[in-house]
């Protein structure tokens, strides 16, 4: 990654925290974890059994929240045009945006998971597996979010369309992430493979989508 992209990454991270994006993600995530026990009742054994899956579903939905502001504002402001004029690869710019998005939402989400685990009565062992899965899977979620944001940036009603695009593609992450609670290391390896595939391919998809939107 070009050294000139680090100021852009730092700007995006600061914008993610200063604009309240990280706070909204955490609040939404905790709301889901708080309301879910009310929906199924105070069965501690059931909550402990399905709590990890609930956390993963909440994390997936929380990662979708900031999709509309990941690409569209800079596309409208001409930021990508300026970067292209300066010779920056749009795929590299998309990779930088992925890293910034991950830094803005994943660490707060993983910290909030500790609170969610208490609400869902998860054991310490289960919490460690959930945290390991999130550490492995959230880069894939960030990559998918940026690619989806780029693909829908120039469309009317991009927020709703982004959800329709991103949620089906994120199903493998959800399956292997939640499956790690019972499948252990083998499920984590599959989760890592899917996440790595998304991280490797998403910058090129996002870069091509941004270039098409600029024309």
Image: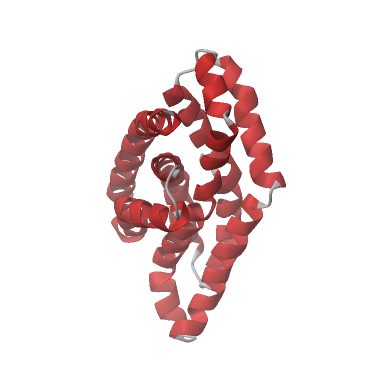
In the image: residue 129, left or right of residue 105: left
Q: Which of 183 and 215 is in front in this view?
A: 215
Q: Residue at x 66, y 32 (%)?
A: 11
| Residue 74 in sight | yes
Q: Which of 154 and 69 is in front in this view?
A: 154
Q: Nearer the viewer, residue 205 or 214?
A: 214
Percent x, y of residue 136: 42, 43
Q: Residue furthest top?
A: 87
Percent x, y of residue 140: 40, 42
Q: Which residue lies furthest to the right in this view?
A: 18
Q: Which colour scheme is used?
A: secondary structure
Q: In this view, does 214 lie above or below 13?
A: above
| Residue 180 in sight | no
Percent x, y of residue 145: 44, 45
Report which quarter residue 130 is drawn in: bottom left
Q: Nearer the viewer, residue 188 or 11?
A: 11
Quarter of the picture holding the C terminus = top left
In the image: residue 181, left or right of residue 134: left
Q: Is residue 59 above or below residue 192?
A: below
Report which quarter residue 174 is drawn in: bottom left
Percent x, y of residue 157: 45, 55
Report the number of numbered marks: 0
In the image: residue 158, left or right of residue 115: left
Q: Is residue 117 above or below residue 145?
A: below
Q: Which residue is drawn at 47% across and 30% down?
A: 94
Q: Residue at x 50, y 19 (%)?
A: 84
């Amino acid at each position: 990654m070009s050294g000139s992209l680090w100021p852009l990454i730092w700007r995006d991270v600061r914008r993610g925290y200063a604009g309240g994006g990280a706070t909204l993600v955490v609040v939404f995530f905790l709301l889901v974890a708080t309301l879910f026990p009310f929906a199924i009742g105070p069965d501690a054994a059931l909550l402990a059994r399905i709590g990890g899956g609930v956390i993963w579903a909440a994390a997936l939905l929380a990662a979708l929240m900031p999709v509309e502001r990941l690409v569209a504002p800079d596309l409208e402001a001409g930021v990508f045009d300026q970067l292209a004029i300066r010779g920056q690869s749009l795929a590299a710019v998309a990779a930088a945006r992925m890293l910034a998005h991950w830094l803005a939402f994943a660490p707060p989400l993983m910290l909030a998971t500790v609170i969610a685990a208490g609400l869902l009565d998860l054991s310490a062992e289960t919490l460690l597996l959930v945290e390991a899965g999130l550490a492995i899977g959230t880069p894939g979620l960030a990559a998918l979010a940026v690619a989806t944001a780029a693909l829908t940036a120039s469309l009317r009603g991009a927020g709703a369309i982004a959800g329709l695009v991103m949620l089906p593609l994120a199903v493998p992450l959800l399956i292997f992430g939640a499956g790690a609670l019972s499948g252990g290391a083998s499920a984590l390896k599959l989760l890592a493979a899917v996440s790595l595939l998304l991280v490797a391919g998403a910058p090129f998809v996002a870069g091509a989508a941004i270039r098409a939107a600029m024309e």
